[in-house]
Amino acid sequence: MSKTSPVIRRVFMSRLLPQSGLDFLTQKGVDVTVGQRDDERGLDRPALRQGVSACDVLMPLLSERVDAELLALNPRLLGIAQMAVGTDNVDLSEATRLGIPVTNTPGILTEASADFTWALLMAVARRVPEAHRYTAEGRFKIWGPNLLLGADVGPGPDGRQKVLGIVGYGRIGEAVARRAVGFGMRILAHARNRSRVEADPKVTWASLEEVLKQSDFLTLHPPLTPETRHLISEPELRSMKSSAYLLNLARGPIVDERALVKALDEGWIAGAGLDVFEREPEIEPELKALPNVVLAPHIASATVETRSQMSLMAARNAWAHLQGERAPNVLNPEVYDTEAYSQRRALLAP
């Protein structure tokens, strides 16, 4: 009697993740296919469709749209393991209806993202990119008392305490606030979870209107929902101080980019730092030309340690999907009790 061949489980990784996740899965005997290995190119839709159709678990990134049409391609798909905190690119309700658990990678990127919030804040306030270009282009001939004057982040010579406004007070918002203490700032926060803000003694909850009105620096960290899309548009920008700076490290569509261009160009606010964009990777052309904005290519979590741990967490979620176990970071846990999920598991080869 011949022995039964071991069942090969297949994961489709839409783009190449850091090596830690790939190593974890291959050591488990998983057949991993990578759709795109070039970090500067996305995966086209036909290749994504083909990959989803032939795998047991999909590991996408925010750059791929995982909608109802894609989810319907494979009745044997056992799960989606995304390497990101946000999952607004995934139709979560449709995945649940079809019996597909969806996971993300929360928590790990909190500290790196908070650090980068401050990197952007300091860069735009103290005009660091402008200073670099000025120096690198050979324009620095002599020290000047009026050269590239920026804004104080700490109290400054007059002792006035600066106000940091935080919109969205989850893990990242709280980590940003912890760093603000070292700058002697007064911290205002607005979030759906008011009790979380009020439980933090270093932070004062305020309405969105008050946060906008009082902030010297306003940083955005809410999830993208229908309610937060264009949360910051022309009326909100006009209500801010002309000396204020806006930071967006959440999702691009939270800010109306056309309104922001107008605000920066006409001096409604002093400057902005953006790591995300409304139609990413497209950027309003005027933003690229304005001197009072610092732009980054969605790299808030881009440290070696953080991205390695995110990749490993996504891989562990994928392995749980393959094993039929409750994944550690599942976003739709109710799916495990559905008939649709049971039917998917029943399709597995013995």
Image: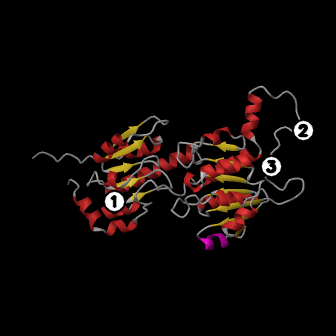
Identify the residue under disc 2: 145
Task: Report the amino acid beneath label 3.
Answer: Ala
Q: Position of residue 151 (x, y in %)?
A: 80, 49
Left or right: where 218 falls relative to 11: right
Identify the residue under disc 3: 151
- Locate residue 96: give its quadrant: bottom left
Going from N to C along the chain, the mark reached first, 2 or 3, is 2
Residue depicted at x 60% and y 58%:
221
> How packed is label 1: few (under 14 Cα within 10 Å), some, or many (20 or more)?
many
Q: Nearer the viewer, mark 2 or mark 1?
A: 2
Q: Position of residue 259 (x, y in %)?
A: 64, 52
Q: Is residue 123 visible?
A: yes
Dots 2 and 3: beta carbons under 8 Å?
no
> How packed is label 2: few (under 14 Cα within 10 Å), some, or many (20 or more)?
few
Please determine whether, in this image, residue 206 is positioned above or below residue 139.
below
- Locate residue 94: give its quadrant: bottom left
